[in-house]
Image (cartoon, rainbow, N blue to C red):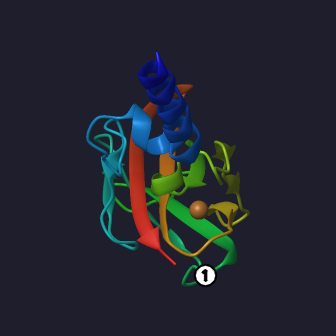
Amino acid sequence: MKLLMFVALFALFLGIAAPGSVSAAPVSPVKSDYQPLPNPGKKVPLGTGHYFTFGFEKQPKLGKAIMKVEIFTLDGNRDRSFVVKGDVDMPSMRGAHSSGSKDFALSAKGLYLLPVQLVMPGDWEFRFAFEKNGKTVFHGAYLFDI
Ligand SMILES: [Cu+2]
């Protein structure tokens, strides 16, 4: 009886102290349906007819950072017909500082921009979702640290 109580208390303690570590099998920093992205500035294929580039406007540091996405057709014309969504979070503390999914704003120049708050030093993940005609056509995740 005492032993059972101890086990129950211990489980409770684990649940409170380390909610992230109890749940999952092998911890992968990138969720599987999110394609890992190359370094900022590189062209990333987007479907068969487009590519995009992404990157923070400045080297990200604690506080506000602005993610920028540019989308082009294969022949190099800027494309504004996508809806781009982003969210930022710390993989080691999922949900603790998640921004939630937010729409990028399309600037007059055709840049997709999204400001986010980076509230803690450490490893972060920026997730992108690209939609065209209401359908999600691409998921990507970019890992970085500050
Ligand atoms: Cu954190």
Position of residue 23 measured from the top left corner of the image (x, y, whole percent) = 41, 32
Q: Nearer the viewer, residue 16 or 32?
A: 16
What residue did someone put label 1 on?
A: 61
Type of amino acid at the residue the image marks with label 1: Lys
Above or below: residue 83 compared with residue 114: above
**Label 1: how many Cα within 10 Å (few below 14, some 14–19, many 20+):** some
Position of residue 2 measured from the top left corner of the image (x, y, whole percent) = 48, 22
Tell me if the residue at label 1 has its CB under 8 Å from ligand 1.
no
Residue 39's quadrant in the figure? bottom left
State the count of labels: 1
Seen at 39% across and 62% down, the residue is 76
Q: Residue reaching furthest top? A: 1
Give the structural element (helix, strand or loop) at label 1.
loop
Above or below: residue 36 compared with residue 134: below
Seen at 66% across and 52% down, the residue is 104
The answer to whether 85 appears left or right of 73 in the picture is right
Above or below: residue 144 compared with residue 139: below
For the question of whether residue 32 can be seen, the reply is: yes
**Ligand 1 shown in quarter:** bottom right
Position of residue 140 measured from the top left corner of the image (x, y, whole percent) = 39, 48
Q: Nearer the viewer, residue 105 or 50?
A: 105
Q: Residue reaching furthest front? A: 2
The answer to whether 31 appears left or right of 19 in the picture is left
The answer to whether 91 appears left or right of 16 in the picture is left
Above or below: residue 36 compared with residue 70: above
Seen at 60% across and 81% down, the residue is 61
